[in-house]
Amino acid sequence: MADRITLQVTRYLPEDSARPTSRDYEIPLRKDWSILDGLNHIKDHVDGTLSYRWSCRMGICGSCGMTVNGEPKLACATFLADYAPGPVRVEPLNNFPVIRDLVVEIGDFLEKLSAVKPWIIREDEEPVDGEYLQTPAELAEYKQFSMCINCMLCYSACPVYGLEPGFIGPAAIALAQRYNLDSRDQGSHERLDVLSTDEGVWDCTFVGECTRACPKHVDPAGAIQRYKPTAVTETLKAFLLPRGKR
Amino acid sequence: MTEKVEYGEFYARWYKPRVSRLWWLRRRSYLVFVVRELSSVFVAWFVVFLLLLVRAISQGEREYQRFLDLSANPWMLALNVITLFFVVFHTVTWFDAAPQAIVVRLRGRRVPAKLILILHYAAWILLTGITAWIVLD
């Protein structure tokens, strides 16, 4: 194995240039180094002006999403050795405006996330003795969707989001389903108005790239497809049934 | 020479990359997606063709014979062969999505995706068989 590898990192410095450029950095190639370790090496020893987001280094925080050789990846969970002898292209996430270098603007995602009310909604907050109990089967119903770390790799992989920025998007819908399928939650009707619109689940045409990109195996495409029959039955119920029986 | 960029009131100007016109060639799944979207026209034609057939049957033997003559036209035949291809394509991709949309639990266990897929194909073959039996009998 060669002992050095080149990272071709996209630089965008709005004070210098209107367009991003690519800069090559030759760094040590170590077996246990992730792309993030490589970027940290550049930041510490080669070029301190490089900007990127990171925090936990272990695939939990979802901060270090970027495009590695054209694929959306977590920089901390993607290893340099897998790309040897290189070079490795490191670009910001697709489908998001770039603020600086590898840092993208995520306000749109955060707005969409809060629009689906990703928290437990109770109609009447009963005082419970201890906590709301749940069987393992009830937990299994939503657990997969609760693994989402909001890393936005799925938004970067989704061509629909690139073309229709109004699309509520894979992670937000998966997280809505995480709460809809939770036995303690009673707020699915509040999420229906957001999810069953054109810009909700119906914008998704099942490309499936979100599920392939997801580093936590959440399967957002599955969550969206699963919600489509629900959206249809709930909308029909709203038409056909008197208010009290919905 | 670099072009100077003004800072906004609160932040630097964002770079908003444009989606390239050939984005759908970048990945096989993107290409399949675009083909599926565009070929919906053929699925719509398939429905129109069936409705025209029903209408021709309801209007008596002469209309039905005219419809059959029209269908035998080489252009119409070619169109319908292409349509058949895309309707099958849509059916297969629809079935691929079905196991992810349908979550059935039997005795607390989730019915495996493969079984749901097999049941879809079995139903397809069965219905095709029944239709063929009615038409050819």
Image (cartoon, coloured by chain):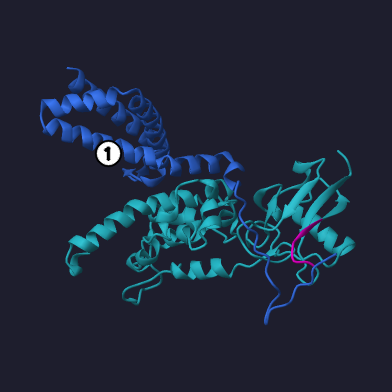
Chain colours: A cyan, B blue
Residue A134: x, y in percent? 38, 60
Q: Is residue B135 visible?
A: yes
Judge whether residue A212 is colored magenta.
no
From the viewer's side, name the closer residue of A158 and A35: A158
User: Compared with residue B130, is residue A56 higher up or lower down, i.e. above or below?
Assistant: below
Q: Residue at x 40, y 33 (%)?
A: B86
Task: Farthest residue to the left: give it.
Answer: B60
Q: Residue at x 37, y 43 (%)?
A: B109
Chain holding disc 1? B
Mark 1 lies on residue: B48
Q: Main secondary structure of the magenta part?
A: loop
Image quadrant where one finds the C terminus of chain B: top left
Question: Is residue A64 toward the left or the right of residue B21 in the image?
Answer: right
On the image, which quarter does residue A176 sit in?
bottom left
- The region drawn magenta spans A17-22
Image quadrant where one finds the N terminus of chain B: bottom right
User: Compared with residue A113, is residue A214 higher up or lower down, i.e. above or below?
Assistant: above
On the image, which quarter does residue B26 sit in?
top right
Question: Is residue A82 toward the left or the right of residue A225 in the image?
Answer: right
Residue B125: x, y in percent? 30, 26
User: Compared with residue B54, is residue B133 higher up or lower down, i.e. above or below?
Assistant: above
Judge whether residue A19 is colored magenta.
yes
Local secondary structure at mark 1: helix
What residue type is disc 1 on?
Val
Q: Residue at x 38, y 64 (%)?
A: A133
From the viewer's side, name the closer residue of A245 and A192: A192
User: Compared with residue A75, is residue A126 higher up or lower down, i.e. above or below?
Assistant: below
Question: Is residue B15 toward the left or the right of residue B94 in the image?
Answer: right
Residue B41: x, y in percent? 38, 41
